[in-house]
Image: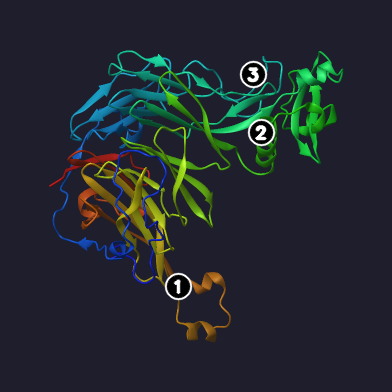
Amino acid sequence: MVGAAYLVAGDDPFDLWDSTPDACEVESSSESFDIAAARAVRQVLSPEPVLRWTPVSLPVEAGVETEIISSASTPPDGLVYILATEKDRVRLLATVDGVEWNELPLPADVHPEFFRRSDEHWVIAGPATDRGSDDGDDVSSGRFLEPLELPLDRVVVSDDGGESWAEVPVDPQNPPMWSDQHLPTLDLLVSGEQIALVTLVRPVMHLDEVLADRGLLQANEDAGVVGFEDGEVVVGIREAGSLRASDISGSARILRLPLDDLDLTERDLELVHRFDRINAAGLGYVRVYAGDRDGLKIEAEFDTEIVRGVASEDDFVLAVDRDEARGWRFLASADGRTWDEIYSAGSSLSLPLAGLGPDGRALAVVGHSRQAQTVLTLGCGQPPMPVAAFELPEPNGSWVSELVVSGGPAGLVAIQKSEKIEFPDTEIAEQKGRPTETETIDEKRREGSASWSPDGDTWSMLDTQDAFGVDLASSTIRFAVGGDFVLARVKAREMNSAWYVAEVP
């Protein structure tokens, strides 16, 4: 059986702490992490209980883009939420059983890219519905605009179930010579009263006033910072309202100014470094705005472009991508303001965070090799604890190419897809002469499996062909785990999405 779940054998795959981390002091368990107990974890494949699937219809038109939000609520309320993007609007739908759906009210002036809720608030983040074109061609500001130079997404909060919404101020805290080129928001996290907005940012430096004061810029000209070289800032000068600053070939002339002449602050120099690094390679860097409904301000920044987040009732957890070789850093915060590294791991073959587990804690999926993938719970003031581990059989002939874990109050669902490569007999290959790479591969196929567990200990396999009429290897299936049900969205090839629900036994 491809993709059977069991603990990795051999060397200790749980390179975890053996004591409670000092980070994020909140009321939580201080029990030490037991390495020996982690090694003894075993997952049992059982024919029972199984999930019985029933087709369901959502109150949306065929072909409408939908996004499942299975961990929108902290603490988990057992509901599953869906954002449905129709031609002229976005609808927020919620269900307590996967069958009956209710539409929830949304603000009229914010396009809801993210919806989160806690016991205290409903919170939405997204662009203003009237902010205009995204193409960056508006030159009414009198300076160059970079591609995707958009305003920061708005954040709005409701305390009355969406009937009314109030703006949450977000302060970019830019120094005088800088503005932000905001790319789409990466995540919105809400825990109790605390809110964290995770964004991708490019710094943009503006020297128009400095150059004009020195007589280096005429009234009909714009200045655009192109980069930094040898302690100097390189500036392109052009006719006002013409090309963007990043296109140096369109500059009428180039100026070079020593950075020492600009009286830069420590924050200026930090942004210069980021500007230079991003220009060399990359889209931007990650910034975390945090606070409460009274306002958000910059609390953390990371020199990376990939961050995933999840909020529990007690804390926030971020997975920060270091690089392909070194994998992920997991950071935790009780309030979004102070972040501490609580764990690091090798690269995962899946999304590093899988929502909230049955106990309400953040679920992380980490890799120890191409075959070994471990599901952990992480959080403030508690050691990482293993929930489940996956290893693919026949490590010399196949490996996990995808592992998607979804958690919720009713348990966990895991999807594994494997890519299997068979090689021909070596002696036969040698008789034919040195084989090419293409000739060496005799057979290559994709296989997949899915499984469900109420607690991470006992797992039952899901027969997707029998349940949904599709082959898992050639289709996309995503699960959302509610209070006592599991919802599945199934999409095969060019077909519209089909939906199924199973009541948890």
> Residue 421's x, y, as percent?
43, 68
Identify which residue is drawn at 14% across, 54% down.
Answer: 49
Find numbered disc 1 in the image and state the secondary structure of the residue it sits on.
loop
- Image quadrant in which the N terminus is located: bottom left
Name the image quarter holding residue 371: bottom left
Looking at the rendered image, the disc whose residue lies closer to the viewer, 1 or 2, is: 2
Find numbered disc 3 in the image and state the secondary structure of the residue it sits on.
loop
Graded by Cα atoms within 10 Å as few (under 14), some (14 to 19) or many (20 or more), the crowding at tag 3 reads some
Q: Earlier in the sequence, mark 1 or mark 2?
A: 2
| Inter-mark Cα distance, 1 to 2 | 52 Å
Disc 2 marks a residue whose amino acid type is Leu
Q: Earlier in the sequence, mark 1 or mark 3?
A: 3
Q: Which mark is residue 271?
A: 2
Marks 1 & 2, CB-CB < 8 Å contact: no
| Inter-mark Cα distance, 1 to 3 | 56 Å
Identify which residue is drawn at 27% across, 49% down.
Answer: 413
Which residue is identified by label 1?
A: 442
Q: Which mark is residue 88?
A: none
Marks 2 & 3, CB-CB < 8 Å contact: no
Marks 1 & 3, CB-CB < 8 Å contact: no
- Of 407 and 426, the residue lying toward us: 407
Disc 3 marks a residue whose amino acid type is Asp
Identify which residue is drawn at 58% across, 42% down.
Answer: 303
274 to 173, vertically: above or below: below
> Residue 271's x, y, as percent?
66, 33
